[in-house]
Image (spheres, rainbow, N blue to C red):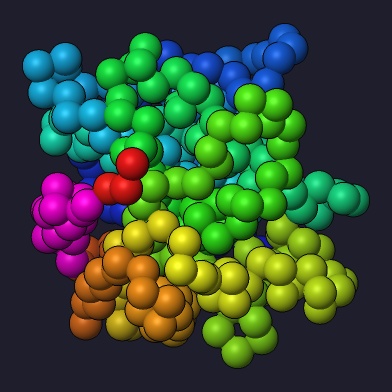
Amino acid sequence: MKHYLLCPLLFLLGGTATAQQEIFLYEGEHLPTPVADVLTESADPSITVWLPPAEKANGKAVIVCPGGGYGVLVIEREGHAIAREFNKAGIAAFVLKYRLPCRKKDNSSWPLQDAQAAIRMVRQRAEEWRIAPHKIGIMGFSAGGHLAATAGTHYNTPVIENPEKTSLRPDFMILVYPVISFSETIGHTGSRDNLLGEAAPQEEIDLYCNERHVNATTPPAFLTHGSDDTVVPTANSLVFYENLRKNGVTTEMHLYAKGEHGYLSHPPFDEWFGRCLYWLANLEFRQ
């Protein structure tokens, strides 16, 4: 039985998303993504490009990874709606439609491949999209947060072809009620089983326990989580935050007494997203 982790943000930041430009990550013939709030299939990985008005653009960019337990993609509420809000702040956004492993054989690396391919593409086309190539970050919600954290802790281990040696390191991470660990104590077993299968060897589980792979070069991170989250324990954010601090990585975390999973009614969107924008505005980027 699949374990789907749906994590809707029940604020509607505008109506149904209208795709500005969908660009597929790999060569070949593709079917365009259907308009939907939640995607249950994602065979053709892509990024949808959301650019701010030229007069507002500040050179920063975020690749947004929707959540869904590696079983579905909450593509509107945790993707396009967020991209529109970043555009209002002058930040380019790229909504990642990544492949869902569905527990088929030997495809646990699909989501990370797609995240790395997205980082490579955005960085290679930075000038075209008025982006500073050293100000490209990644954001993820729930299981999408696990993917974003994996991209930020495993960038030195490419799982894609990268003949140009383009840097695959995100310049920052924004992790919203994220799955960080696949451990028995705090991990989200539904996401783990969907990504790795129910009989994954311990070595593979450890590989995707991202709290174990933090070092001094891990990108800066902003974390936010609800203390009352009964789906993905707050301990996921806490352990990641502590390991970032121990390694001297710039990090900020905001925990809310009420938030549950998906920030259903608390905290208000402007509260947590405003803090995220403030952190990003004051973040010092390395060249």
Looking at the image, residue 9 sits to the left or right of residue 215; the answer is left
Q: Residue at x 35, y 60 (%)?
A: 220
**In this view, which residue lies farthest toward the front?**
287
Q: Residue at x 72, y 36 (%)?
A: 160
Residue drawn where x is 63% and y is 52% of the image: 156
Specify the segment rendered in magenta.
Answer: 267-284
Task: Pick whichever, 71 or 108, lies toward us.
Answer: 108
Depth check: 51 or 36 in front? Answer: 51
Give x and y (percent) for residue 83: 30, 34
Asked if the magenta segment contains residue 282, the reply would be yes
State the residue in front, 150 or 102. Answer: 150
Give above or below for 217 relative to 270. Answer: below
Placement of the C terminus among the 4 image quadrants: top left
Q: Position of residue 271 (x, y in %)?
A: 12, 60
Q: Position of residue 230 (x, y in %)?
A: 44, 80
Note whether residue 284 is visible: yes
Q: Residue furthest bottom?
A: 185
